[in-house]
Image (cartoon, helix red, strand yellow):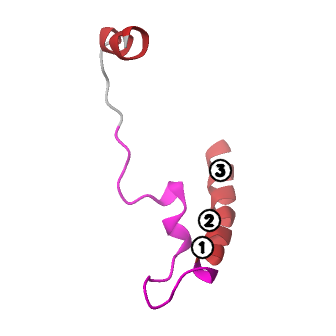
Amino acid sequence: MGEARSQQAWAQTSSVLALIANLHRDPKKTRAYKPADFNPHMRKTPVTIEKVEIRILKQVFVDQ
């Protein structure tokens, strides 16, 4: 249910963002924006999560 609520909220938010962006764009220089351009749930490339060992994370975040 939480995922569906998030998708619904982003659908509304991305529509408003696309409207505002289209109001302020130069039609001669850029194409019209679509709500999908602003919606993180509609990404064309999936986000990949890599698994790494804990010692690497310690080096990055603790030892720096």
Q: Which residue matches tag 1?
A: 18
* Cβ–Cβ under 8 Å for marks 3 and 2: no
Which amino acid type corresponds to the residue marked 1 in the rendered image? Ala
Task: Give the SS element for disc 1.
Answer: helix
Can you tell which mark lies on residue 6? 3
Q: Rounded to the nearest whole Å, what is the CA distance between mark 3 and mark 2? A: 12 Å
**Prevailing secondary structure class for the magenta stretch in the rendered image:** loop
Which of marks 2 and 3 precedes in the sequence?
3
Q: Residue at x 65, y 74 (%)?
A: 20
The N terminus lies in quadrant? top right
Task: Give the SS element for disc 2.
Answer: helix
Q: Residue at x 52, y 85 (%)?
A: 26
Can you tell which mark lies on residue 42? none
Q: Position of residue 34 (x, y in %)?
A: 52, 75
**The residue stretch that appears in magenta:** 22-48
Q: Which residue matches tag 2?
A: 14
Residue 23 picture quarter: bottom right
Which amino acid type corresponds to the residue marked 3 in the rendered image? Ser
Q: Rounded to the nearest whole Å, what is the CA distance between mark 3 and mark 1? A: 18 Å
Q: Rounded to the nearest whole Å, what is the CA distance between mark 2 and mark 1? A: 6 Å
Q: Position of residue 63 (x, y in %)?
A: 38, 8
* Cβ–Cβ under 8 Å for marks 2 and 1: yes
Q: Give left or right: position of 38 versus 16.
A: left
